[in-house]
């Protein structure tokens, strides 16, 4: 069974745009991990609409696909995931 892993990110107000860009670039490298099914990892953001109350300050999202729970556990335990 395919597992879809979703993570939302928000930053402190003092975090620079440059730092956010670097963070997103590093997230995108995770798609090369063998535990990510067919390289299916998407990072979205920042939002192109004005912030709305229900967004609760989240600016970026990561969506990744894993073939099973073991592959997700491997992804979460990887050194690349903990950079």
Image (cartoon, grey):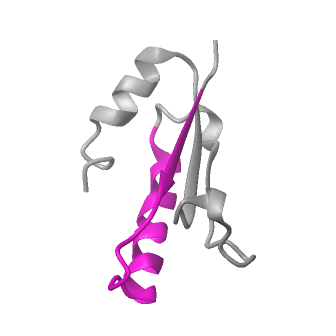
Q: Which residue sits furthest front? A: 53
Q: Which residue sits furthest top? A: 1
Query: x and y percent of residue 36 in the render?
Result: 53, 36
- Depicted 44 relative to depicted 73: above or below: below
- Taking depth in this image into account, of 62 and 37 the one nearest to the observer is 62
Left or right: 43, with 27 as reference point: right
- Depicted 19 relative to depicted 75: above or below: below
Residue at 55% x, 67% y is 59
- Depicted 9 relative to depicted 48: above or below: above
Q: What is the magenta range?
A: 4-33
Left or right: 2, with 69 as reference point: right
- Depicted 9 relative to depicted 33: above or below: below
Query: x and y percent of residue 69 in the render?
Result: 46, 16
User: On the rendered image, what quadrant is the N terminus found in?
Assistant: top right
Q: Tell me, yes or no, whether the highlighted magenta stretch contains residue 47.
A: no
Residue at 45% x, 42% y is 33
Q: Which residue sits furthest right? A: 49
Query: x and y percent of residue 39 in the render?
Result: 60, 43
Query: x and y percent of residue 29 in the render?
Result: 46, 58
Q: In which quarter of the image is residue 53?
A: bottom right
User: On the rendered image, what quadrant is the C terminus found in?
Assistant: bottom left
Tag count in the figure? Answer: 0
Q: Tell me, yes or no, whether the highlighted magenta stretch contains residue 11.
A: yes
């Amino acid at each position: 069974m395919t597992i879809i892993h979703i993570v939302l990110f928000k930053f402190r107000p003092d975090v620079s745009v440059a730092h956010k860009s670097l963070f997103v670039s590093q997230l995108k490298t995770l798609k090369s991990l063998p535990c990510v099914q067919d390289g299916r990892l998407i990072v979205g953001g920042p939002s192109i609409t004005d912030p709305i109350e229900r967004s609760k300050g989240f600016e970026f999202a990561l969506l990744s696909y894993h073939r099973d729970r073991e592959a997700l556990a491997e992804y979460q335990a990887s050194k690349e995931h903990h950079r």
